[in-house]
Image: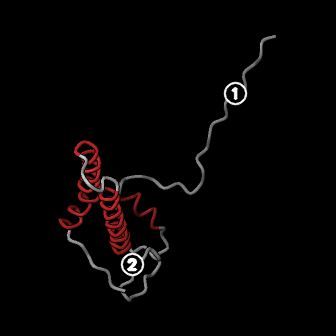
Amino acid sequence: MKFIKLSDKMYETLKWLCLIALPALAWGYSQLSDVWALPYGTEIPETINIVAFVLGCLIGVSTINYNAEKYNIEGAGYDDGESIEDDGEPAAEELLEDEGLEFFEDEPEVPEVPEEETAE
């Protein structure tokens, strides 16, 4: 299955719409409808928020597919018709290394705290 790839500008514009513009518009209309007795004071903001949510979900899927292609992550939803070979290195390690972080497979050691002596 082929996926549509968004340009950076389109991605940033849609992200801004979903996270800032549409929720602000919904809230603004809701508040103004109370003050000015505008019609559909609940229905219009809820509809705007639903549109923002759906667009946000589509952007999220696009991001998952982009990262799957970029980091060659198997089973993340990206399929270009070719099989993805496992190189033996977990994708999480690659992502963390790109950020200069370290991946721990075992739980970190917690130092023992000495028990307090009770004074009697």
Left or right of 69? Residue 8 is: left
Question: Which mark's residue is nearer the viewer, 1 or 2?
Answer: 2
Colouring: secondary structure
Q: Position of residue 26 (x, y in %)?
A: 28, 53
Residue, x 45% and y 53% (percent of image)?
102
Position of 39 relative to 67 (above/below): above
Quadrant in the rendering for residue 106: bottom right
Residue, x 30% and y 60% (percent of image)?
48
Q: Position of residue 30 (x, y in %)?
A: 29, 49
Residue topped by disc 2: 78
Quadrant in the rendering for residue 119: top right
Helix, strand or loop under label 2: loop
What residue type is disc 2 on? Tyr
What residue type is disc 1 on? Pro
Quadrant showing the C terminus: top right
Left or right of 85? Residue 38 is: left
Position of 28 relative to 47 (above/below): above
> Which mark sits nearer the N-terminus, 1 or 2?
2
Residue, x 61% and y 44% (percent of image)?
109
The single residue placed furthest to the left in the displayed view is 9
Residue topped by disc 1: 114
Quadrant showing the N terminus: bottom left
- Residues 25 and 72: in front is 25
Left or right of 56? Residue 117 is: right
Crowdedness near tag 2: few (<14), some (14–19) or many (≥20) residues, C-alpha within 10 Å: many
The single residue placed furthest to the top in the displayed view is 120
Position of 62 relative to 39 (above/below): below
Residue, x 45% and y 67% (percent of image)?
91
Spatial separation of the CA atoms under disc 1 and disc 2: 51 Å
- The tag on residue 39 is none
